[in-house]
Amino acid sequence: MNRSFKCPGVLGARLRPGSLDPDPHYVPSDAIMLDFRRRFFAVSDGSSRNPGTAGFLLAHIAREFEDWPELDDYSIWSRTGLEKIKARLRRRVERAMAAVPYFESCTLTGLLLGETSRGQVGLIVHTGDSLLYHYRPETGVRAISKTNFWLAGRSKRLYQLEQIEIPAGSVLFLATDGLADLVFPAGFGREEVLGLCLGTGEVEDVSDRLLERYDHRVKLADDLSVVALRPERVQPCSTRIILGRVDLEEAGFNPVECSGPQCRLILRDSIR
């Protein structure tokens, strides 16, 4: 049960189920959030025992972002305004984390985009072992996330809240830890291969290239969620999607449209 979304020249996302469960109707425990309205993008990895937890967390984050005027006008953030947004981001994301039951924990790696007088910035929220990489043509791939054992549900606090500068030409890459199951050629490390994939072709095709070339493990593999985006090309619009399993009533949503009884697209306004 693959789920994917592409916005040409801007973003490509894909949720690929693993092979840890022989059940042909297995539902991935990963989830992806693509909120173009708020310019927030995230991945989450839950336990296979509770495959809806990751989607539950992301849906609660979306709800926390509902009433946030500073993210609606897309103005330039002042230094003082940026610090206020950081503090508000922490409070709102940690409230969503606190809603996750203790025994249904999951990871979170998210990116909120904004503009300052010095250029585009990203605010990183992270806990657990999902991954965020920053690719620049002149410097290659750099890991931004710090792997840890703090999980939403088990912890009510973010492990990492960090600000990064995003120069023109950057590509941001988010993934769950199923990335470790990809098989790279002898002598090639993960960051080297990611640099090749992120630096060539269109960004919306990164996940397809990565899986077609390196997703060949014959033994059991974990679920994998991948998002690649060019932040400078993100234009605010009403599109907001969660890929993954979500209990809509429990999450507090009244979506316009959904597809599939298990793996749903949450469409609050529209999808293009």
Image (cartoon, rainbow, N blue to C red):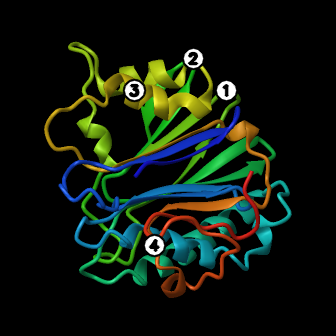
Secondary structure under badge 3?
Answer: helix
Comes first in the chain, label 2 or label 3: 2
The residue sitting at 46% across, 18% down in the picture is: 196
Tell me the number on the disc at residue 138: 2
- Alpha carbon of mark 4 to alpha carbon of mark 1: how far? 31 Å
Residue 1 or 179: which is nearer the viewer? Answer: 1
Under mark 2, the amino acid is Glu
The three-letter amino acid code for the residue at tag 4 is: Leu
Residue 108 vertical placement versus 178 (above, below): below
Can you identify the residue that label 4 sits on? 57
Position above or below: 140 against 66: above
Q: Closer to the camera: disc 2 or disc 4?
A: 4
* Mark nearer the N terminus (2 vs 4): 4
User: Nearer the viewer's eye, disc 2 or disc 3?
Assistant: 3
Find residue 214 and report its horizontal and vertical position in percent.
32, 25
Give the distance between the C-alpha atoms of the residues marked 3 and 1, in whole angstroms.
25 Å
Q: Nearer the viewer, residue 17 or 191?
A: 17
Which residue is pictured at 50% across the width and 68% down the height?
58
